[in-house]
Amino acid sequence: MSEIGNEDIVKAYVYGDTVELTTANGQQKQKIKVISGRRYVNLETGQIHDMDISNTTRFDNLKTVKQTMKKLRRLVAHNFTGGVNQLWITLTYKVHIIDPDIVYKDFKIFIRRVRKIYGHIEYIAVIEPQASGRWHLHVLMKSDSPLFIPNSELAHFWRKGFTKTKRLKRADKIGNYLIAYLSNLQISDEDSNSKATAKGARLYMYPKGIRIYRTSRGIEKPLELTTKKGVVIETFKINSPPDFSRTTTHETHYGIKEYTTEFYDNIKSLSDTFSGETDRPQE
């Protein structure tokens, strides 16, 4: 396992009580340049090529979905830590809805009804596909005070099918838990009572260009910065080795690259970094 050196340039993501460092920092030398006519030029050879703008392959779309899920994981971990003021709501349909625009339109009506009774509530709403192609929603909700909404009342607000309510516990790594839930697909064997879970199967089912999640305006974005690892360690007063690290290889425009990512959890100094109210743009 590679170790990131203190002089190495990293991209740092700071969220919740976690600092995530990666050598995939976007600082690689540019080797292609997009030009007119849907073409690009190789800056090393001078050759001009047509751009492949279809991006319809499962592999290309899967890379985009995975990046979105990483961003979502950080966003959830930064805003939801569990407690009596937070809920996880699942909204499903009793009819076969396959148009995501309809889902988000119905959700806007739902959250308006909730806020009318319970006041201002922040949320992250995530759309999820089922094997049949039908969509449903997972909604993380929180307020400034204890939040108790009976499931029967939520079903009345939804009026499109069924609802399920889960209390978020402080012990949960909520961002990791949600992404793991959204990644796997349970597959039933029609010839038996056995069920299997295909790891990462749901990620393949998101169509190209879909907006996987939406947030309210009060949901805060994690801090991102690009600098030397040593600067990050000193700034956030990290005095222990990473809780977890991994090294992966990726095929890029610049050839095969090896990236190392380190996670530092339970960093107490981060409470000072994110103290106070911040008006952040909507996702």
Image (cartoon, rainbow, N blue to C red):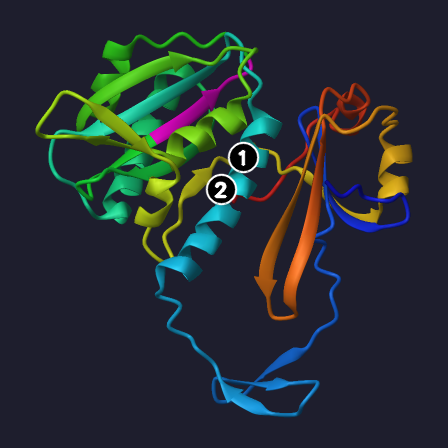
- Horizontally, residue 149 falls left or right of residue 170, namely left
- Horizontally, residue 119 falls left or right of residue 252, namely left
| Amino acid type, residue under disc 1 in the picture | Arg
Cβ–Cβ under 8 Å for marks 2 and 1? yes
Residue under pointer 2: 69
* Kind of element beneath mark 1: helix
Q: Position of residue 237 (x, y in %)?
A: 88, 27
87 and 186: which one is in front? 186
Crowd tier of the residue under label 1, counting other residues whose Cα lies within 10 Å: few below 14, some 14–19, many 20 or above: many
Q: Position of residue 36 (x, y in %)?
A: 53, 88
Q: Is residue 258 above or below residue 120?
A: below
Give the position of the N terminus as an image quadrant. Answer: top right
247 and 221: which one is in front? 247
Residue under pointer 1: 73
50 and 101: which one is in front? 50
Q: Is residue 91 above or below residue 97?
A: above
Please provide the residue range marked out in magenta: 138-144
- Please say whether residue 140 is one of the residues in the magenta stretch: yes
Q: Position of residue 138 (x, y in %)?
A: 36, 29
Q: How many marks?
A: 2
